[in-house]
Image (cartoon, grey):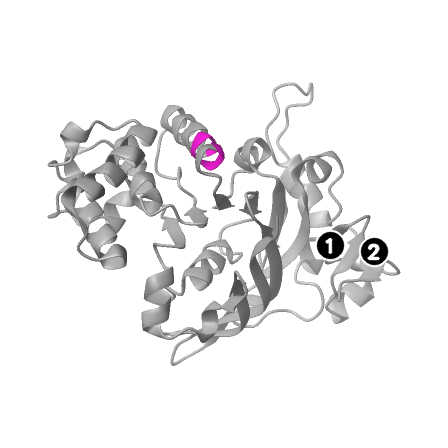
């Protein structure tokens, strides 16, 4: 299996009349075919911007630099029509809140028909219904609900429908942007189990964006830890949970509640993420890091390779720098 998605030195700037926010700063990341990559980090670290940059659905105020290769084709060089053909058919996205992503005055069936006809043209109704039935069955929604409107579904059912809509054209890559955020705990578990089953059934590549480290522990093959617009660590999930390298990752792990530990006091990371309209010099994490040195405060660390893993921290100076 090869690399489906290759992100190279991507930076995203949000510009206004008063300031410019550097939401992503020279991010590089590879996603292998058929794998699940978890993207984790605090709110505001650039996770959703990363997913939206891949889909090319950032607001007009955003400026993107770098390269995003999908099957060897640079998405940032595609014209709007070329990107329209890719989006939905080859790369799709599951958003946080399905109610804001679905048209409230369109029936469920019309959402599917519009998606299919946009990419496949006016195909026969029998073929369209066959495609719809496959994904509706997969997510456990009866075809009898096709003439209902989104507001007639519960939150969990709407999210299932959103998943079915994103899979109806069998895309090679699916980006799930915190797909369980607005759901209760029981429904969250159902949706995550569903995504896991569908990923195996359809053999799709999945980028799972979340702030919940418990979620990626169960689903992901690799984890990319984002902090203040940087990927500070990238590693196989088992290795990262067993031995996190970056100080930020270590502190995130300690902040996870664990009822099996006698000392049940919850740890936390002191301080706040930096203001990305004026990022601090050196490592973005230095003012919250217990291991910070003068060098950390002055020089931005490159990406080092440690036993095949990637980490952006001066603690690992002397290891091979990623080329």
Depth check: give the residue in front, 116 or 223: 116
Query: Label 1, on which residue?
Result: 311
**Occupied quadrant, residue 132:** top left
What's the residue at 57%, 38% (across, down)?
Answer: 220
Range drawn in magenta? 196-200
Q: Is residue 58 left or right of residue 116?
A: right
Q: How many marks?
A: 2
Q: Is residue 243 left or right of residue 133?
A: right
Label 2 with label 1: CB-CB less than 8 Å: yes
Dot 1: element: strand
Query: Label 2, on which residue?
Result: 316
What's the residue at 24%, 52% (across, down)?
Answer: 115
Depth check: give the residue in front, 176 or 91: 91
Q: Can residue 285 be seen?
A: yes
Answer few, some or many: residues within 10 Å of disc 2's Cα (few below 14, many 20 plus, some between 14 and 19).
Answer: some
Q: Is residue 308 left or right of residue 2?
A: right
Does the segment drawn in magenta span residue 278? no
Find the distance from the CA under tag 2 to the CA under tag 1: 8 Å
What's the residue at 56%, 45% (across, down)?
Answer: 37
Pick whichever of labels 2 and 1 is earlier in the sequence.
1
In the picture, the quarter occupied by the C terminus is bottom right
Is 50 above or below relative to 80?
above
Could you tell me what secondary structure mostly forms the magenta stretch?
helix
**Measured from the top left, where is residue 114 in percent x and y?**
19, 53
What's the residue at 68%, 71% (across, down)?
Answer: 281
């Amino acid at each position: 299996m090869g690399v489906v998605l290759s992100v190279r030195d991507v930076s995203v700037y949000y510009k206004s009349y008063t300031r410019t926010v550097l939401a992503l700063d020279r991010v590089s990341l590879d996603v292998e075919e058929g794998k699940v990559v978890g993207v984790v980090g605090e709110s505001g670290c650039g996770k959703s911007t990363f997913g939206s940059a891949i889909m090319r659905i950032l607001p007009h105020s955003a400026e993107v630099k770098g390269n995003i290769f999908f099957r060897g084709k640079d998405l940032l060089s595609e014209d709007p029509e070329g990107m329209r053909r890719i989006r939905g058919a080859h790369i799709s996205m599951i958003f946080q809140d399905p109610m804001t992503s679905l048209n409230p005055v369109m029936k469920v069936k019309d959402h599917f028909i519009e998606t299919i006809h946009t990419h496949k043209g006016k195909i026969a109704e029998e073929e369209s219904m066959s495609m719809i039935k496959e994904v509706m069955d997969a997510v456990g929604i009866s075809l009898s609900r096709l003439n209902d409107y989104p507001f007639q579904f519960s939150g969990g059912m709407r999210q299932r429908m959103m998943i079915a809509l994103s899979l109806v054209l069998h895309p090679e890559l699916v980006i799930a942007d915190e797909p369980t955020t607005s759901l209760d705990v029981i429904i969250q578990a159902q949706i995550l189990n569903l995504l896991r089953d569908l990923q195996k059934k359809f053999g799709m590549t999945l980028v799972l964006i979340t702030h919940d480290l418990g979620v990626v522990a169960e689903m992901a093959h690799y984890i990319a830890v984002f902090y203040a617009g940087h990927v500070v660590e990238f590693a196989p999930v088992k290795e990262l949970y067993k031995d996190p390298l970056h100080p930020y990752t270590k502190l995130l792990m300690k902040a996870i509640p664990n009822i099996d530990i006698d000392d049940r006091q919850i740890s936390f990371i002191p301080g706040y993420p930096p203001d990305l309209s004026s990022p601090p010099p050196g490592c973005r994490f230095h003012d919250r890091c217990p291991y910070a040195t003068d060098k950390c405060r002055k020089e931005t660390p490159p990406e080092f390779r440690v036993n095949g893993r990637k980490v952006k921290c001066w603690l690992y100076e002397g290891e091979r720098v990623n080329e």
